[in-house]
Amino acid sequence: MRIALVMPGFSRDADHWAIPVLQSLATCLAQTHEVVVFSLRYPEQGVYHFGGLTHIALGGGTRMGGASLGVWGRAVRAIVAEHRRRPFDVLHAFWVDEPAFTAVLAAKIIQRRVIATAVGGELVYLPDIDYGTQGSAVRRQIIRFALHHADLVTGGSEYQLALLRAHAVPAAKSLLTHLGVDTTLFHPHPTPPWEQPTIVQAASLIPVKNHALFLEVLQLVQEKIPTVRALLTGAGPLAQSLRELAASYNVADRVEWRGLLPYDQMPHFHPQGHLYLQTSRHESGGVAVTEALACGLPIVGTPVGLLPEVAALPPQTTAVALAQQILTLLQPEQHVRQRQRARQQAEEQFSLPHTTARFVQLYEAASTKNHHDFF
């Protein structure tokens, strides 16, 4: 098959991990299919070849407002031109705002079906932290258009599917499709020493990730286990204020701020922990969660994204409840059982070959004339 993938951004080369989970998917697909990636925003305009795929970058950058019309127009023309050079079998857009919008417009011209995957914050708006695409009137309109006209809409978690249905996407055309993790790259290491129980998290230092809750949980755990520590990787505008908050909670000496780690270091980051704590207010799925699972880390956290499906204990929203769960999971016998469960779940549900094969099934169904083949 010839597959067009439409995304906001993509990698320039194999070592430029712009959106790692999508690079892994695209290069895995390219082993057996012809894959052309169209990126709307980044990197700079150009045509890139690596991993057996072709990447056509429109180079729209951060130009928004009226300039977005030009970006969308160039994307549609590029998809149509490439289809006329050699026809696509299916178009697959990641993010249901401008990538899905442009894919749907192009598909109407070239008469192909579109699969759209909701990936980020397109379906929500949290006004107190100004997070989510639904806060923009224009974006709400293009999302509504894309959701209505896409032939199939997928989400990476049951939580995300519920949001799709709240946006009037019929159950008949919404489907759960997990994004995969390379379980050969992310795998368990020997359990770290118990003298210093370690909680890890990989998340940008932005309000929606709710690191304040993380630090509050850490404070409560420290009252029972004084040697506990936390490893955090990620960068963002809250870096300084979070350090100050950690000091006010008297856990500054318990936190190691690793900054933004290169992606090739992430398979070594997760195994340094005993468990993974998610504190986000919203996640569409949770790439870091699946990577931690693959490394054998039990997961605890808030009831968003994948947590209702993969958490070692039922997701919670309060620091007290999460701290108690962590204390339970840091008992060595309990930890061993949950560690084995985590790795098994990653292999059975989230391994890259498994999730990629599921997408291929959808592409094959989309390229037929029978919509019922989707199911």
Image (spheres, helix red, strand yellow):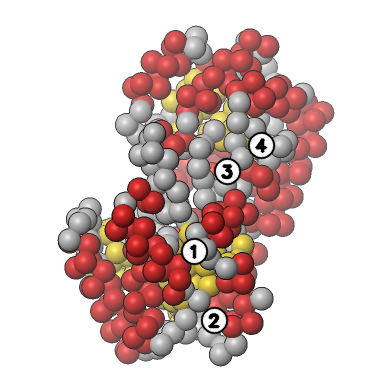
Residue corresponding to mark 1 = 117
Q: Are marks 1 and 3 in contact (CB under 8 Å)?
A: no
Using a 10 Å C-alpha cutoff, classify the residue at mark 1 as few (fewer than 14 neighbours), some (14 to 19) or many (20 or more): many
Residue corresponding to mark 3 = 304
Does residue 258 appear anywhere in the picture? Answer: yes
**Is 283 above or below relative to 223?**
below
- The amino acid beneath tag 2 is Ala
Residue corresponding to mark 4 = 315
Task: Give the mark nearer the N terminus: 3 vs 4.
Answer: 3
- The amino acid beneath tag 4 is Pro
Using a 10 Å C-alpha cutoff, classify the residue at mark 2 as few (fewer than 14 neighbours), some (14 to 19) or many (20 or more): many
Q: Nearer the viewer, residue 356 or 53?
A: 356
Using a 10 Å C-alpha cutoff, classify the residue at mark 4 as few (fewer than 14 neighbours), some (14 to 19) or many (20 or more): many
Q: Secondary structure at mark 1?
A: strand
Task: Give the mark nearer the N terminus: 4 vs 1.
Answer: 1
Residue 28 is situated, as x and y percent measured from the top left of the image, at: 52, 67
